[in-house]
Amino acid sequence: MKVALALLLAGCLCVERAFSLVCWSCDGAESNWGCWKWQICSSDDNYCATTYVGGGIGEYSSQSISKGCVPVCPQGGINIGIAAASVKCCSSFLCNISGASSVQANHLVLAASILASFLYLFRHRL
């Protein structure tokens, strides 16, 4: 009886978990509405990633969104006003539904700082 329990315990300890991460997946979609496929990640992939690249001047603008499984998270972003790029990562079931919100929030901060600069310049010129 003790041998059977020891074998059962050893078997339970040696079994890998059967859970696989599932992420939304797309490549170069124009919006999140183009990213409704999902992908079962490999055992090496630990994160779901959303990559956003966009830019524009006036009414001429474009953006590209890519989503999928990645083994390492290269999270970060840059926003220079007329162009932005962002990578966001998460690690739960279908967690990368959206990822460009931080880039959009940066546009609001940029617009507010430009407005404040103009107000400062006009106030000191008069």
Image (cartoon, rainbow, N blue to C red):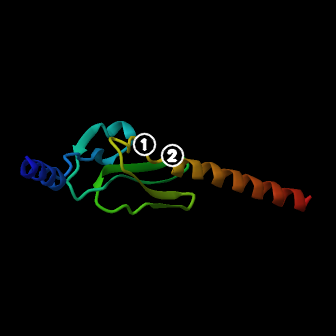
Identify whether 23 is placed above or below 73: above
Q: Where residue 59 sits in the image (x, y, percent)?
A: 52, 45
For the point 49% across and 57% down, which residue is it?
Answer: 84
Q: Where residue 26 sits in the image (x, y, percent)?
A: 28, 46
Nearest to the observer: residue 106 or residue 6? 6
10 Å crowding of disc 1: few (<14), some (14-19), many (20+): some
Q: Where residue 107 sits in the image (x, y, percent)?
A: 59, 51
Count of labels in the image: 2
Look at label 2 and name its amino acid. Answer: Ser
For the point 55% across and 49% down, which residue is it?
Answer: 58
Q: Which mark is residue 21?
A: none
10 Å crowding of disc 2: few (<14), some (14-19), many (20+): few
Q: From mark 1 to mark 2, how far is it between C-alphas?
A: 7 Å
Identify whether 120 is placed above or below 34: below
For the point 38% across and 50% down, which residue is it?
Answer: 64
Label 1: element kind? loop
- Image quadrant holding the C terminus, namely bottom right
C-beta proximity under 8 Å, tags 1 and 2: yes
Q: Where residue 32 sits in the image (x, y, percent)?
A: 38, 40
Q: Residue furthest right?
A: 126
Give the left or right position of residue 119, taking residue 79 as reference: right
Nearest to the observer: residue 52 or residue 3? 3
Give the left or right position of residue 65, taking residue 125 as reference: left
Q: Which mark is residue 101?
A: 2
Give the left or right position of residue 118, taking residue 66 as reference: right
Label 2: element kind? helix
Look at label 1 and name its amino acid. Answer: Ser
Nearest to the observer: residue 44 or residue 61? 44
Q: Which mark is residue 98?
A: 1
